[in-house]
Image (tube, rainbow, N blue to C red):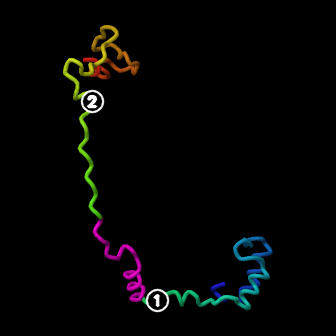
Amino acid sequence: MDLKAKELLPDIRGLFERDLVDTFICGDYEAVSSDLINPKYNLNYKREVHQSIFDRYTDILTTWAGYQPQPDPAPQEEWPAPAEPPAAKLPPDLAPAKPKLPRKVGRNEPCICGSGKKFKRCCIDKYQ
């Protein structure tokens, strides 16, 4: 439509006859041909939208929020200091202990967790 190519109407008809044009977007052949012959809309709308580069730049600087001066943000309240974890308040004799092994496990035996690794490479730190 923007090309104003009335001379392409026979080619356009052939495209419609071969069902190569999606009528959902532009309508049927009669609608396309009538719009090319007698346009209902101003086809120079693109020329009206575009300004000079200087006018566009001025418009951007005055309207876009990123180019506007921002007020200083309001001061935020400070978060309270984190409380001590409950385990830190316990006396040393009541501190959580490491789990005990169900049986004596050698360092080179398979790990008791079932991972298939040697005990010394897997869970030895959890039980000592």
**Residue 97 or residue 80, whichever sits in front:** 80
Q: What residue is shown with label 2?
A: 86
Q: How many numbered circles are shown?
A: 2
Badge 2 vs badge 1, beta-carbon distance below 8 Å: no
Task: Point out the residue furthest to the top here.
Answer: 103
Q: Point out residue 83 in the picture as x, y percentages from the top left corner.
A: 25, 38
- Residue type at numbered disc 1: Gln
At x 19%, y 21%, the residue is 92
Residue reaching furthest left?
92
**Which residues are the magenta region?**
53-73
The answer to whether residue 123 is left or right of residue 24 is: left
On-image quarter of the N terminus: bottom right
- Give the residue drawn at x 71%, y 85%: 8
Viewer-side residue, 53 vs 82 = 82
Q: Earlier in the sequence, mark 2 or mark 1?
A: 1
On the image, the x and y values in percent for residue 48 come to 54, 90
Q: Position of residue 66 (x, y in %)?
A: 36, 73
The crowding category of the residue bearing disc 2, from other C-alpha atoms within 10 Å (few below 14, some 14 to 19, many at least 20), is few
Q: Amino acid at mark 2?
A: Pro
- Which of discs 2 and 1 lies nearer the camera? The answer is 2
Mark number, residue 79:
none
Mark 1 highlights which residue?
A: 51
51 up-or-down from 87: above or below: below
Q: Position of residue 114 (x, y in %)?
A: 40, 18
Would you call the spot at circle 1 few (<14 residues within 10 Å), some (14-19), or many (20 or more)?
few
> In the displayed structure, would residue 113 be above or below residue 14?
above
Task: Indicate the quadrant where residue 105 lies.
Answer: top left
Q: Residue at x 39, y 88 (%)?
A: 54
Q: Main secondary structure of the magenta part?
A: helix
Above or below, comparing residue 22 to residue 59 in the picture: above
